[in-house]
Structure formats: C-alpha cells, structure tokens
Amino acid sequence: MLQIINITDARNNLAKLIEKIKATKEPVVIVQDSDPSVVVYPYDEIVKREEEKNQLFQLKFQQIFREGEKKFRQYLRKKSIRTSRSEKPTQLSKMHKIKVVVDTNVFISGFLFGGNPRKIIEAWINKNYIFCLSPQLKAEILNKLQKRFLLSAQALQIIKDALDDNTEKYIPKKKISICKDPQDNFLLELAEEATADYLISGDKLVLEIKRYQKTKIISPKNFLKLL
C-alpha cells in the first residue's frame, strides 16, 4: 500500500523513514503544501526497475532487427541484388566506456543487414560504450530509415526513443572542411565536440582520414577487435 507523509514529518524522522522504506520495500510519497512532491523508492526496487527496463529495451530492438532485415531484403529484391543471410548475433564482452561516434551507414546496416554493424549496435544496446549523438546525425539516421527503407512508425519511434534516452548529446560549435565528401564533415564536427575516442564508419573516404585530433577512425571490424 502506498505510504504518504508530509515533508515536516519526513524531515524530522528521516532515519526512521529510511528504515521503514527498507523494511517494507514500499515507496513513500512526500507531500508539501498539501500537494504530492516526490516519491522515495527503495534502492533495490530502483535497480530492479532499471534491469526490467533494459531487458524490455533489448527485446524491442531484437524485434526491430527482424523487421529491418525483412525491409532490407525487400529493398534488395527491388534492386535485383542477391545477398547471403546475416550471421546470428553473438554475445559481446564488456569494455571500457569509451566515447564513440557511429556513422549513419554503420547504424543503418546494423538494423537492416546484420554482421559486424549489428554487433556494434548490440554493444550500444548493452551499454558497452557511450554513443555520441548530434541533432544532424539523429535526423539523418531517422530520415534514411523512414524514407529509403520504410520502417514502421512503431519501429522508428523505438529507435528515436533509444537515441533520446541512451546517448550523450552534443551540438557541435565548430565547422570544419576536411572530408572529400562535404556531407561527412558533420561526423568529425561531432567527434571533436564530444572528444570521441572512435568514429566507426564503413565509408572509404572517411576511413582514409584515419585520425582526427583525438578521434581514431576505424571500420566496424577493427572496432570489434577491441571488445
């Protein structure tokens, strides 16, 4: 049963309140000026909820992977391109929480095809690295998934929520002009603003830069060797 206590009683009996919450494992609503102000939860309950949230998050992404692969096969059939079946996902080992910029081509390949890009996405889902995101990168990912591969609205919303909730956000302040393809410069701008350790790309023109300031530019295959 939900417990309710006013803020004065909570302040005067804080130690007893904490012990009560630990013993009953029930949340307590603290009221201020007759209005509910905050809810205090037992720590174990918070941990449990986070674990359940992560499990649901991973389950939703497995569903999107299946939908993405189906859409990609449909796309290839329209283009009359043959491809082999993608390999099954493997469990990735935990690694130091490094900052990473994931190129749009790697992100989309991970959802639609599989292989090494899929493992990159799985490592992000499992929170094995910090995914660095800018407004431009988010917009490009969502626009391409929607317009070119026609993912469902539900799948796009799950991806959007994941990008909103499970990334570090940056707004690059400095404009640069290094890439042979000017449309790729925003990736380096994000990497510089985030002081990213790695930029993962499948684009040969981006990969040939090799390093920009602190950021090492590598392929999905070479990044996975770090896991």
Image (cartoon, rainbow, N blue to C red):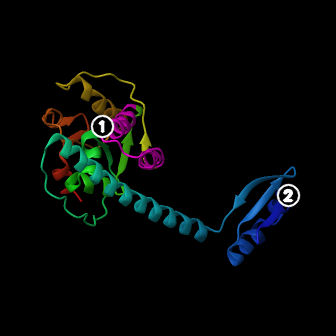
Question: Residue tagged by mark 1?
Answer: 148
Residue 219: image x %, image y %? Answer: 17, 46
Choose mark 1 or mark 2, whichever is in front: 1
Q: Nearer the viewer, residue 73 or 174?
A: 73
Q: Residue at x 80, y 60 (%)?
A: 11
Assign the C terminus to one quadrant of the image. bottom left
- The amino acid type found where label 1 is placed reads Arg
Residue 56 higher or lower than 23, as above or below: above
Magenta stretch encompasses residue 159: yes
Left or right of residue 181: residue 21: right
Residue 63 to residue 143: above or below: below
Give the residue at x 23% y 23%: 182
Query: In the depicted view, which residue is nearer to us: 113 or 222?
Result: 113
The magenta segment is: 136-165
- Disc 2: which residue: 8
- Could you tell me residue 19's position as x and y percent? 72, 74
Residue 125 quadrant: bottom left
Q: Is residue 118 shown left or right of residue 13?
A: left
Q: Residue at x 13, y 45 (%)?
A: 81
**Mark 1 or 2, nearer chain start:** 2
How many other residues sit within 10 Å of disc 1, few (<14), some (14-19) or many (≥20)?
few
- 10 Å neighbourhood of mark 2: few (<14), some, or many (≥20)? few
